[in-house]
Amino acid sequence: MLLAILEFMIDSHCHLDYCAHPDEVASPELRAMISIGTSLERCKATLKLAENHANVWAAVGIHPNNASDAKDEAVRKGIEELARHPRVVAIGETGFDTYWDDESLDTQAESFRWQVALARALDKALILHIRDKDEQEDASLKAIDMLKEANYSRGILHCFNGHKGLLEVGLGLGWMVSFAGNLTYKKATELHEAAKVVPQDRLLIETDSPFLAPVPKRGKKNQPSFVRHTAEFLAQLRRESLERVESYTDANAVRIYGLPLEPND
């Protein structure tokens, strides 16, 4: 039964190019994987994986920790060219990160504005990364302001951090809310509460491989096939069957990314 469910599951966000053996972890058991680029060179590698695997699609963009790269016209041009490839289904991940001190929020905002404009021009999903320093919310608050400014309705709050204000704004814009393996962690109570209230038609699940491996794989290198553990935990939280959660989260991924796949029965 579990193998049958896996054959229909979608990992809505992973980084295959960061995995030690990407061609091996690009699981043939899964219906689809969306592999996310974070720099121009990594976007090229990600797109090559999508070209080589029928169940892999790509997203291209500049990660907020690399936001200064977006000031380079050659980098922008390179990303814009890749974004038009038919195997590219989203722009990003862009966003705001204050956990590391690599880039200022102003520089990250400039990169975000360019990427949301690109997503709008190509009518593709925008993937948003938000990470705050511990016990702070500067990145989340900046994201709220920028989402209101952009007023773009086709987006994903990737690896959602549990911020209530961000959830309200994201849902108000019509965005998807994606939960990663850290949803399964015992102390992630804010995530648990958020996952219970997000409407069915807005929920996604992801691995963020090779990072954030879910329980019972925590501490190991994550991989797309581990998405089933997050799905199982989400089903328990919402008191729904695994089959039900798999069905609507996969349908949501197909819809937001515009994947050329038939809906699950």
Image: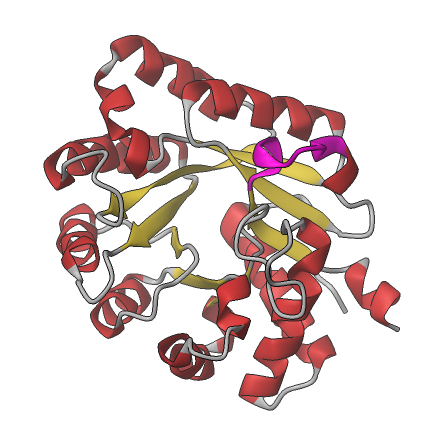
Residue 219: within the magenta? Answer: no
Q: Nearer the viewer, residue 122 or 100?
A: 100
Q: Residue at x 17, y 38 (%)?
A: 109
Q: x and y percent of residue 181 in the render?
A: 55, 63
Q: Residue at x 30, y 53 (%)?
A: 130
- Quadrant containing the C terminus is bottom right
Q: Nearer the viewer, residue 122 or 83?
A: 83
Q: x and y percent of residue 246 in the render?
A: 68, 70
Q: Is residue 84 visible?
A: no
The residue positioned farthest toward the front in the image shown? 219
- Quadrant containing the N terminus is bottom right
Q: Which residues are magenta?
A: 15-23
Q: Is 33 left, or right, of 109 in this rendering?
A: right
Q: Nearer the viewer, residue 145 or 149?
A: 145
Q: Is 144 left, or right, of 61 in this rendering?
A: left
The residue positioned farthest toward the bottom in the image shown? 239
Q: x and y percent of residue 76 in the render?
A: 32, 17
How is the protein colored in the picture? secondary structure
